[in-house]
Image (cartoon, rainbow, N blue to C red):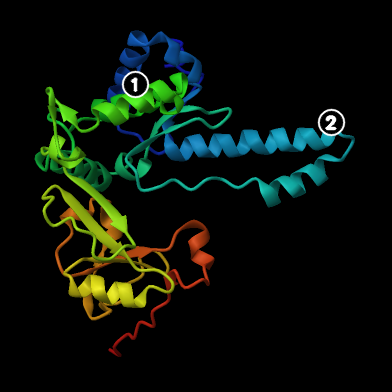
Amino acid sequence: MVDNDVVDIADFGKIKDVSIVNEWCRALFEGVQEFPELRKNQLFTGSCQAQYGIWHSKKTEWYVQKYIDAGRSRSDGEYWAKKYIKKPKVTERWAHSSQREFVSGIAVNEKYTATKKGVDALQCGLKRSVDLKFHPPGCDTLKSIVDHELGHQIDDLLALHKDQEVIKLFKTLRDRRDGVTYKNIFAAFSNIQFYDYTKIPGRKVKDIPNYHLTFSEADGNALETLNAIRAGMNVATVFGIKKNSPMPEIWNGLPVFNGDDSDLRFLDPKGVVVGLYAKGKAKKDTSGFVKYPTIMLKAA
């Protein structure tokens, strides 16, 4: 990829499957060939983990050099860089598009490409998203992921999401399809499954078959949570326990389902609390948003 002048840096980290690397690179090469302007944004491709690692190293060195240029010692710069420059956490997404300085470009998550278990989960997730019409037919390949992320790159390049004419056009055409004006976007795209979280109980969405809502438990909404449960909604709860530790079996009177296994909430079983592990700053949350259950283990 570097030799073909598609990117400046290519690093796939722990991804050793040559077929995956080749398919990813081939799709990226074709995308840049079709849209040459994308090249200026493609400083990096590879794994998300490697991308963030390189960014952290380069940003740290940049920070230290600023101290040196100001007449301070390298050790001072390194001390403060360690304090303020933190390596970003890779999310649960299959891949992402990044505009971070030094390493802008698209990258794929090692979680779904570095092991057979991860690859199987990725392939299953891609197929399922198409079967459920969440993604269009044909979007069950690694190339489709690359194309999707390049779409974000094109948006960033052209700033379409900020263009008032584009925004106006979108709002005008959002509920229109094939010359027909529909009641809402859900009706206009009835073949697509929509889903979301909400803290508003009692939303009138039962007549929208392709829109799934999960209620979010948070600080101060115990009554709303209870009402959501009574209305038959699943409730998402963030637990302040270590990842891979067992979640409570029961919460708010409902069985707990591990929601970290997939982001597709409309696939969750009905009548459950969707348990999520606290991540990032939420690990230290004391506002009441994160719940800290006491898990009793049975004696052997």
Local secondary structure at mark 2: helix
Give yes or no for contact between labels 1 and 2 (Cβ–Cβ under 8 Å): no
Relative placement, left or right, of 259 versus 47 is: left
Identify whether 209 is placed above or below 175.
Answer: below
Q: Residue at x 30, y 31 (%)?
A: 171
Q: Nearer the viewer, residue 155 or 127?
A: 155
Q: Dot 1 corresponds to which residue?
A: 25
Q: Nearer the viewer, residue 265 or 116?
A: 265
Q: Nearer the viewer, residue 84 or 123?
A: 84
Q: Point out the frontmost of discs 1 and 2.
A: 2
Percent position of residue 168, x then y: 36, 26
Q: Residue at x 16, y 44 (%)?
A: 193
Percent position of residue 216, x then y: 33, 64
Q: In the rendering, which numbered label is found on residue 69? A: 2
Q: Amino acid at mark 1?
A: Cys
Q: Residue at x 32, y 77 (%)?
A: 223
Relative placement, left or right, of 152 versus 139 is: right
Q: In the rendering, which numbered label is found on residue 126? A: none
